[in-house]
Image: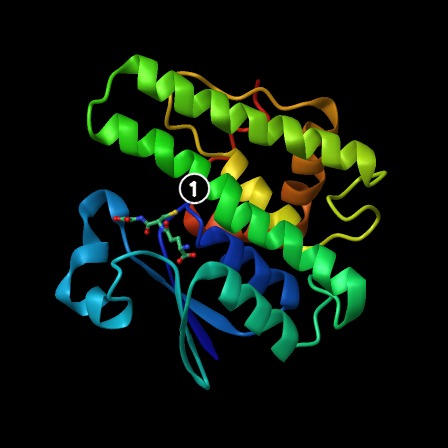
């Protein structure tokens, strides 16, 4: 049994969808970021960084969403990250890209917003976000699609679909046609729909 500490719709959702995709037993524990619960003494004992997600496993606690996804996939022989070789490297590449390039691009814009750095700074950060979505569209062309790794659905697709729904800024990104198709396919999967229902979020990225 696993326990996922999550907040609705944020990066921890990539682990939530992974748990659903793998079909393993788990429970969820909501840590409401809007109420500052990530800084409660109880949660800081779980993740001293005061961030979600965190995963209690039979082996102990794992933090960092990408690490949780790799751990879960490998523990259950999943196909979200192939077991070996170049295919594994490419799946890890796109998971790490989502976790450590795409996600931080949003973090920069959020920093500008939270610190009242003005619309010009937010716009610069949002332009940088757009360039990441342009890169994803190009990758879907280069890989032959429909997924980031071509015909194989992998963990990076899940993570990218989570980030696509982040709607914090006035300057919204534009998704290319292949990206929209990816988001539609990934979020249409039963596992993703179950995570949406549990987290009680609205998936708005495809609305425009
Ligand atoms: N690389 C980190 C990123 C975690 C992260 O940025 N979590 C955000 C939500 S997407 C969070 O908990 N923010 C609350 C805060 O920093 O107060 C991980 O994978 O654990």
- Residue furthest bottom in the image: 59
Figure quadrant of residue 180: top right
Expressed as whole percent of the image width and height from the top left, the position of residue 37 reads 20, 54
Expressed as whole percent of the image width and height from the top left, the position of residue 120 reads 33, 13
Expressed as whole percent of the image width and height from the top left, the position of residue 85 reads 79, 68
* Number of residue marks: 1
Q: Which residue is mark 1?
A: 104
Closer-to-camera residue (97/38) = 97
Q: Is residue 122 left or right of residue 184?
A: left
Q: Is residue 179 left or right of residue 120?
A: right
Give the residue drawn at x 58%, y 60%. 18
Closer-to-camera residue (19/175) = 175
Q: Is residue 85 left or right of residue 101?
A: right
Q: Relative to residue 79, is residue 139 depicted above or below? A: above
Expressed as whole percent of the image width and height from the top left, the position of residue 79 reads 74, 65
Closer-to-camera residue (160/76) = 160
Query: Which quadrant of the figure contains the C terminus?
Result: top right
Give the residue drawn at x 58%, y 41%. 161
- Residue furthest top in the image: 120
Figure quadrant of residue 4: bottom left
């Amino acid at each position: 049994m696993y326990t996922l500490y999550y907040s609705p719709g944020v990066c921890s959702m990539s682990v939530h969808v992974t748990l659903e995709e793998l079909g393993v037993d788990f429970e969820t524990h909501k840590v409401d970021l809007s109420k500052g619960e990530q800084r409660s003494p109880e949660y800081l004992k779980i993740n001293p960084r005061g961030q979600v997600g965190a995963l209690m496993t039979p082996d102990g606690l794992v933090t960092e969403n990408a690490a949780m996804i790799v751990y879960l996939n490998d523990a259950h022989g999943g196909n979200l990250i192939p077991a070996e070789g170049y295919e594994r490297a490419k799946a890890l590449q796109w998971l790490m890209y989502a976790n450590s390039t795409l996600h931080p691009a949003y973090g920069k814009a959020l920093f500008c917003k939270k610190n009242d750095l003005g619309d010009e700074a937010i716009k610069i950060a949002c332009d940088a976000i757009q360039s990441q979505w342009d890169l994803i569209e190009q990758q879907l062309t280069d890989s032959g699609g429909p997924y980031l790794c071509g015909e194989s659905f992998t963990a990076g697709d899940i993570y990218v679909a989570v980030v696509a729904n982040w709607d914090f800024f006035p300057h919204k990104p534009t998704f290319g046609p292949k990206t929209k198709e990816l988001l539609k396919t990934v979020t249409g999967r039963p596992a993703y729909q179950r995570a949406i229902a549990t987290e009680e979020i609205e998936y708005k990225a495809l609305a425009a």
